[in-house]
Image: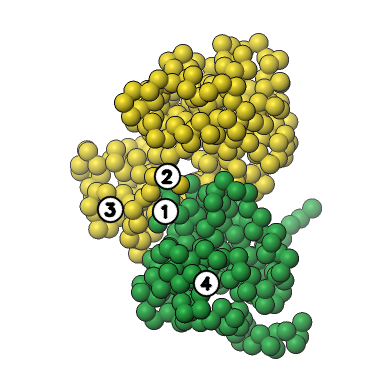
Amino acid sequence: MSVTPPVCAERAVVIGASTGALRALAQVLAPLPADFGEAILVVVHLPAEIPSRLDEVLAHRCRLPIKEAEDKEPILPGTVYLAPPDYHLLVDRGPVCALSIDLPESFSRPSIDVLFSSAADEFGARLTGIVLTGSNADGARGLSAIEHAGGRTLVECPDTAEWPAMPLAALEACPEAEVCALSELAGRLVYRSSGVSIIDAEREA
Amino acid sequence: MDREVGAPVKTLGAEAELEIKLLLEAIYHRFHYDFRKYAMSSLRRRLARACDALGCATVSRLQERVLHDASAFPVLLAHLTIQVSDMFRDPAYFLAIRRKIVPILRTYPSLKLWVAGCSMGEEAYSFAILLHEEGLLERTTLYATDINGDALRTAQLGVYELKRIARFSENYQRASGQRSLSAYYTARYDAAVFDRALAAHIVFSDHSLSTDSAFGEMQMISCRNVLIYFDRELQDRALGLFQESLCHNGFLGLGAKESLRFSKHGEAFRDVAAEERIYQRIA
């Protein structure tokens, strides 16, 4: 049996969310079309002791395949990778997913900063970073690393975010980031990814 | 959550990758530690921390420092290798060993177990306690290996900060511990000193999965959250070494998020407890 090696993603979106994550994530991921061309990597702060069913919960609402990231797993376009609880998720050469149990950063493991900065190292300008609702400051440094690498930065509008602290911290670190209501985020991603609006994409689907 | 927290560090610039490669070559030739096949993403983070700790603005400065200042290398090595783990980390793993592996281990007149990448010994002592409770420790030699001599010396002492014990105990109970964990240590000031009778069955020794070879025939090897820091090639080398070191039908335990799926050695093993990442050598 011969297996064609998978074609790894050329572009990626990284998303970080903390308190209020589930509702916000579903709203960003659910409208994305099945042929969305970028890989999506997600860090959500969850207690390590509780088994995570986040992938199952989100899978019901999304057209894209959603899975927990495995170590050295190739990063494919149109797939959503979730950081496993109690591990940092990083992007390594390939690009592939890489995991680590190094110390928590900003009190978090997985840490949004860790994912964002390692993704910026690998994807450079071919990366979009999004900071969503949360009650801490994780993600701010990482978003700034993405900005420095020439990537695109998006922050959920703090005025309407369920928990504004994390978007505010991100905006303080990256004042140039695009501020965007939750309901518009998916549209902006699709437009950037394929050049067509989400309405066109829905019509074709 | 009672956890140690690392302070955030500046990330290294895009040019750092070349500097890192040069540093790893320098370390290999000067100190004979081989990190050249470690995963770049974690190396970058760990080296950023080492730069911070040693007051070096760039990885090139760090290289100069470790080549000319004898006190700097141990600090760098600690940043590159030392892992903080808990005793009975992932209790389900130890529970599966108790229920599925111990009954088979019982059939051997003498046992050799290898904890590869033992860092400060938390896992080695967990195995010693588990085997003691199953009545197997007397006939067992536990090999606990690491590349970091300082970590091995700490491991040998079996002394852990008292504030970590609550978490260890909770894990131990969830792994179906038969007593109270306090039966195995004495509290002295802010430290828990584990029973020397446990350490008497553990051989702590320097061994590198990058450069050393097999050293004995094992009934079980446990190597958890070590392979995630390696690139695919080095992962394959290590797994090949494990395959070679295991007796026929011997067991291999990996970390909760590690698997044999992406390895060329995958076919030499079968799942015994898929969820807990315990495999058995069949070829």
| Circle 1 residues within 10 Å: few <14, some 14–19, many ≥20 | some
Residue B252, image x and y in percent? Answer: 63, 32
Please name whichever residue, B99 or A92, is drawn nearer the observer in this view of the structure: B99
Q: Chain of mark 4?
A: A
Task: Write down the quadrant of residue A114 in the picture.
Answer: bottom left
- Any part of residue B17 in sight: yes
Tell me the kind of residue under disc 1. Answer: Phe
Same subunit, labels 3 and 1: the answer reads no
Left or right of B208? Residue B189 is left
Residue bearing mark 2:
B3
Drawn side of residue B193 relative to residue B110, left or right: left
Tell me residue B239's x, y (percent). Answer: 59, 37
Helix, strand, or loop for circle 3? helix
Mark 2 crowdedness (10 Å alpha carbons): few <14, some 14-19, many ≥20: few
| Whether labels 3 and 2 share one chain | yes
Q: Which chain is yellow?
A: B
Between the residue at mark 3 and the residue at mark 2, the CA separation in whole angstroms equals 21 Å
Q: Nearer the viewer, mark 3 or mark 4?
A: 4
Q: Name the residue rendered at 73%, 84% in the picture.
A: A202
Q: Where A60 sits versus B203, above or below?
A: below
Residue matched to label 1: A107
Nearest the eye: A195 or B27: A195
Disc 3 residue type?
Answer: Asp
